Amino acid sequence: MTAAAAPVRYTAFGLRIRSEYPLPELLRTTEQEGEPDVEIAIGDLSGAWNRYGGPDDYYAYPDDEFLFRVPEVAIFGVRGGKHITVSPFAEAEEKSIRLYLLGTCMGSILMQRGTLPLHGSAVEINGRAYAFVGESGAGKSTLARAFLSRGYRLLSDDVIAVSQSANGGFPIVMPAYPQQKLWRESMDRLGVEPRGSRHLYESKYAVPVASGFAAEALPLDGIFELGKTEGREAELSPYRGLERLAILRLHTYRPFLIPRLTGEQWHLSAIAGLSSQVDLYRMRRPSAGFSAYELAERVLETVLEGEKVMRG
């Protein structure tokens, strides 16, 4: 098993993190005083898995802990919204372990802490946050990168942490860390240099976002659900009524964990509150061709029109 290193302090998703496992993707902090919000430790979870999980299982739920096992990578344990334990297998690659630590583990921590995680990317437009949600492969990160190429800033990629402001109760997006995951084809189309990027799997790369990262929490003003259409033109229309709740549930990060980690009542309350405060749109891109810049234009038109309405 990998030996634990001296703990390093990071910040991500509005949380102070102290980790024995190196996480170079995250922003390091020099703040040493005070208890961290989340601690990541290297430990042995094989005994716990033998008690609670079977040889063909991927997930187990002992008491207030969530265990999951990824073959040839690690067993992970997430407990109480504060503790993550990683038990690497001998053949595991560090990049694979970090992928799950920053994905499923952090999504689970957010749920346990009462923060709604959405699956998508979020960018800053005129001082406010806008989220792009959708199934894997919908083009969320590609669309966000099109905004970065125009000088807008990235808030989050993959996991979007949506919290409530301390005063006023409006939804805010907590900044994640300065990195995107992009397919090589999207990188080529967008003119993103591979230099400095790290290969993750297949043709997907972790692309650092150096100067285009928004490190402060921002109010969430709109959510665009991205999908595909067989037509030639991009489609954009608002969602109405109860269908908004169904869309927000569908695009909660790892929705199968809701009954176990948060409970249906908490989640329904969270998405109902969000639905009543934020505009939600259905956006479809042509399945053929490359339309990220066109979609960015449509989003900007919608955002600017909404700002005109608000100004009266």
Image: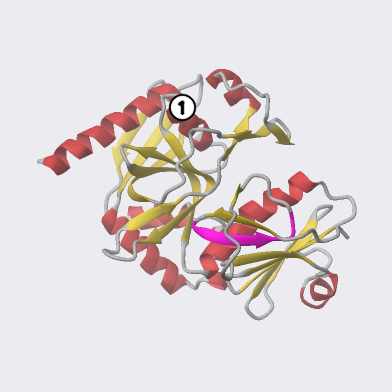
For residue 307, which quarter of the picture? top left
* Spot occupied by residue 132 in the image (x, y as percentages of width and height): 43, 41
Q: Magenta stretch: dominant SS?
A: strand
Q: Name the amino acid, label 1.
A: Ala
Check disc 1 and report its element: helix, strand or loop.
helix
Quickly name the residue at label 1. Answer: 146
Q: In this view, does 239 lie to the left or right of 70?
A: left
Q: In this view, does 213 lie to the left or right of 68?
A: left
Quarter of the picture containing the C terminus is: top left
* Spot occupied by residue 292 in the image (x, y as percentages of width and height): 45, 25
Instruction: Identify which residue, 243 or 199, lies in the foreground.
Output: 199
- The stretch of residues the image draws in magenta is 14-21
**Quick check: can you spot residue 256?**
no
Colouring mode (rainbow / by chain / secondary structure / one colour): secondary structure
**Quick check: can you spot residue 305?**
yes
For image coordinates 31% across by 30% down, the residue present is 300
For image coordinates 52% across by 65% down, the residue present is 111
For image coordinates 33% across by 63% down, the residue present is 272
* Spot occupied by residue 306 in the image (x, y as percentages of width and height): 21, 39
